[in-house]
Image: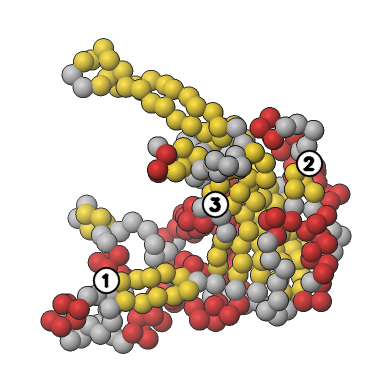
Amino acid sequence: MNKKEILFLWDGENFNPNGDMLKENSPRVDDETNIAEVTDVRIKRTIRDEIMKKDENLIFVKEYKKEENILDCKTAIREVINIKQDKAKIESDILSKFIDIRAFGGVLPISDKDEMKKDKDIKTAGIQFTGPVQFRISKSLHKVQVQHIKGTGAFASGSDKSAKTFREEDFLSYAIFATYGIFDNNNAKNTNFSEDDASVILRALWNGTKNLITRSKMGQTPRFMLIVTYKDDTFAGDLSNSIRLKSDKSDEAIRSINDYTVDFSSLKAKLQRYNEHIQKVEYISDFDFEKNNASEFDMSWQKIGF
């Protein structure tokens, strides 16, 4: 696989893209800047969930159940891999089966010292892979407005049948996020991650973002993805901080894709400086985003589809 960088823009309205468990599942927002954030773990979960819709056997990191009991990692791995073989064979089996491990890596416990003393056929305590596909924390391209609502539930609370349950929740009125990712060609060799795998991951990120049909995420929309493929180990880096929003409205008043345009000038200048190292630059765009921003695109970018 050739080294790649991606810039992925996606948005939503009246949604919670990534709840913070330490703040009663409110959207993650930087207290200093009022910029919304989404962790790399949430992005990877989106990709895994989308791939599992077609074939759940391709994904290792998921919930495993046996007789209604949820299994831990060490128990789950025995459901899919023969652990009584050489470490190299265990590694090979895992990488050949699971695209999420080939892509994102992982630390997988296999056994422990006590079990290995009792069963001499078990020779591996654990394995570790450094994945070639990594994402930085995604950030909104503008300051966000957080709304707080209260509502009543449908069922009575406790023995008092006249009492209703109450719920409170926070959500973002609107936000467009920039996700930056890198696909490293050197780590790809170590996990056998291929160009075909890269296509699967990118397609799952695009389609999975809009296919999260849950109450808190319905309406998320992939808007634009730029894929830069390099000839060598050189890469531009920091693509997400090379663009900015232009709008006549204040940040917190932005409510739709029609309230702004995206300035790509710094990004185009950066890529031009690395032009001799770049094999190709491809993009996919939502219709509305392209309608509003096509004049900012570089003529050398190749349009593709998923």
Badge 1 or badge 3: first in the primary sequence: 1
Identify the amino acid type marked 3. Gly
Badge 3 or badge 2: first in the primary sequence: 3
Q: Residues within 10 Å of mark 1 (few under 14, many from 20)?
A: few
Residue 80 rendering spot, x and y as whole percentages? 31, 70
Q: Which residue is mark 1?
A: 78
Q: Which residue is mark 3?
A: 208
Q: Residues within 10 Å of mark 2 (few under 14, many from 20)?
A: some
Residue 22 rendering spot, x and y as whole percentages? 40, 43
| Left or right of residue 125, residue 167 in this image | right
Which callout, 3 or 2, points to the residue nearer the camera?
2
- The reply to whether the C-beta atoms of the residues labelled 1 and 3 are less than 8 Å apart is no
Q: Residues within 10 Å of mark 3 (few under 14, many from 20)?
A: many
Badge 2 or badge 1: first in the primary sequence: 1
Q: What residue appears at the point 39 percent right and 65 percent down from the top-left corner?
A: 60
Q: Report, in whole angstroms, how far the alpha carbon at label 3 lies from the one at label 2.
A: 28 Å
Q: What residue appears at the point 80 percent right and 33 percent down from the top-left corner?
A: 248
In the drawing, what numbered circle is on residue 144? none
